[in-house]
Amino acid sequence: MDVSEFRRRGKEAVDAIADYYESMADAAPLPTVEPGYLYKLVPREAPEEPEPFDDIIKDMETKIMPGVTHWQSGNFFGWYPCNSSFPGILGEMYSAMFNVVGFSWLSCPAATELETVVMDWLGRLLGLDSRFLSIKEDGTEGRGGGVIQGSASEAHVVAIIAAREMALARLRAQGVRDADQMGAKMVAYFSDQTHSSGEKAAAIVGCKTRAVASDSAFRLTKEALAAAVEEDRRAGLIPFFVCGTFGTTNTAAIDDLPGIADVAGAEQLWFHVDAAYAGAALACPEFRPLARGVERADSFNFNAHKWMLTNFDCSAMWVADSTHMVNALSIHREYLPRTKGSTTFTKDYRDWQVPLGRRFRALKLWFVLRTYGAAGIRAHIRRHVEWAKWLEAQLLADGRFEMVTPVVFGLAVFRIRPAALPAPTEDAANRANAELARRINADRRVFLLGTKLRGMDVLRPAIGSSHGTKANVELLLAVILEFASAVVADCARGE
C-alpha cells in the first residue's frame, strides 16, 4: 500500500468508524455467534500472495463484525464502561502514526515529557495530593509522579514489586540475614471483594496472599485488616502490602481507606489504592470526601479507559515515592543508555513498568483532556450518576425490587425481593433473579451482568457509555420490568 492508497483508505476508514457509531443504536450489544465460528470461516494459513484490500474490508464486515461485542453501545451495561471518544480515537491514530517505542527520554523526548505533563494534569484534576505529582506547586521536582500502564492489573503488579523492594530494603537495613530470600514469607492483603488482578499480581510476584472478609457493606475495614496482620506476624510471616479499593467490581463499595492507611502506617505496609472504575469520579469535587485516606497511600491507580473517555488502554498510576519501584525495575544494558543530567522530564519510564517497550498513550489522553476540558469530563460523569440514581428510584418505586447496595456512582446492584415472590424464600429469590438476568440477556436488547454476593443472586447494570443517552437507561428499565413480571408470574404458576 503506497501513500496515495493509504490516503484514500484512511478516509474510508474514518467514514466507516463514523458510520459505526451513528448506527450503534441499532446494534444488539452481544453477538449471537457460537465458539469456533470464525475458525470455520477463514483459511488455515496466511495468504502466500497479497490480497486486494477491498476483500479484506469485506471479510471484516461479514466475518469479524458478526462476532463483535459492542462495548460502546448505549445498551451495554455489563462489567464496567470502557469509554471511547472521537478525540481518543484520533489521538490513537496519531500515536500509531509515530509508532514510537518510548522506553526512555532519548527514544522519544515528546512521549516522555508529555506523559509527565498530562499525568500531573490528571492528578490535579482528580484532586490528588501533591505527593503524587512530578512537579510540585512551587515548581520543584517531587519524589513521586504518574505513569500510564496498560491496565489496573499491570499497576497491581508494579505496586507489589515496589512494595516487596521496600520491605526487603528495610530487612537489609535491619541486618536480617538472607533478607533477599524472605519473599516466600511475605503476605499481601486484599479484601474478599478486591478485583482478581490483585491475586494474580501476587501470584506473578511470588508472594502469599490473604483475602480478608469484608463487612456487611462489602468493605475492607481497619479492624479486620489489623487482626489479619497481627495473626500473620505471630505466625512468623512478613506483612508488606495492602490494597484498598475505591469502587469494587461487584458493588462499587469503598473500603475503609483512612483505617487501612492507619494500619499500613503502623505496620509499614505499602498501601495501594485500586480505583480502576470509580477513580474517574474524583474529577467531581463532590465525590472527593468519599476518598479520604487516598492522600496517605503509596500508590493510586484508575483506568482513564473506563469512565474518562479515553480509548483502551490507558491506566493511570501514581506513586508517592518512585525510589523503590525504580530500584526494583531498573536493569542496565549498554544498549539502554540513561539520559545525562537526568531530571523529572527525562524519566526512563521503562523503570516504572514491567515491559521495556511502551506506546505513546499520553497523546490520546492529551487529546481527550484538551477537547473535553475538566467541565466536560465532570458533566460526562455526573450525567451517568444521575441516570443510575433515576434507575434506582424507579426500581424502588415499583415495589418488587430491593437495592443490595445504594447507588453512589453509575452502578445499580439490585434484585427481586423474596417478599415479591409467591414462595418468599432466599432460594426462590436466587432462582428468580438468575432467571431474570438470563432472560434479559437472551432477549438481546440490552446486556447486563448477574453476579453473586454472599450467596445472593443479584443484577448489576453499570451505566456509563459515552455514546448512550437517557433513552438507553429507560429501555433498560422497561426490559427489567417486562421480564420481572414474566418471572414472577412463572413462579406463581410453579414454573
Image (cartoon, rainbow, N blue to C red):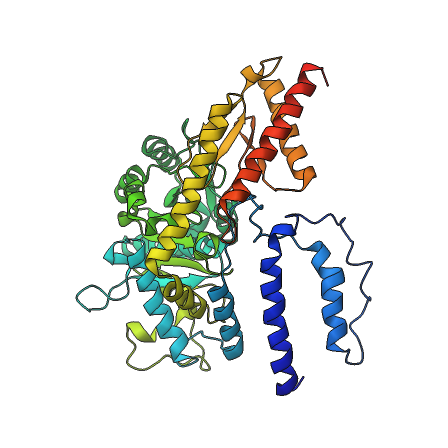
- The residue lying toward the viewer, choosing from 205 and 45, is 45
Above or below for 252 versus 72: above
Q: In which quarter of the image is residue 162?
A: bottom left
| Residue that lies at the very extreme toward the left in this rendered image | 138
User: Percent x, y for residue 369?
Assistant: 38, 63
In this rendering, position of residue 345 left or right of residue 6:
left
Quadrant (top left, top right, bottom left, bottom right) of the C terminus: top right
**88 or 80: nearer the viewer:** 88
x, y percentage for residue 206?
50, 51
Residue sitting at x 37%, y 48%: 281
Residue at the image point whose x is 29% and y is 61% from the top: 144
In this rendering, would 182 be left or right of 75?
left
- Tell me where residue 450 appears, x and y as whole percent: 59, 35
Please identify the quarter of the rendering in which residue 286 is found: top left
Q: Using the image, determine if residue 491 lies above or below residue 173.
A: above
The quarter of the picture where the N terminus appears is: bottom right
In this rendering, does residue 155 appear at all? yes
Q: In this view, does 229 lie above or below 302?
A: above
Q: Which residue is painted at 40% across and 69% down in the image?
A: 349
What is the number of callouts on the image? 0
> For residue 216, which quarter of the picture?
top left
Q: Give the vertical position of 22 relative to 257 (above or below).
A: below
The x and y percentages for residue 316 are: 40, 58
Residue 278 shows in the view: no
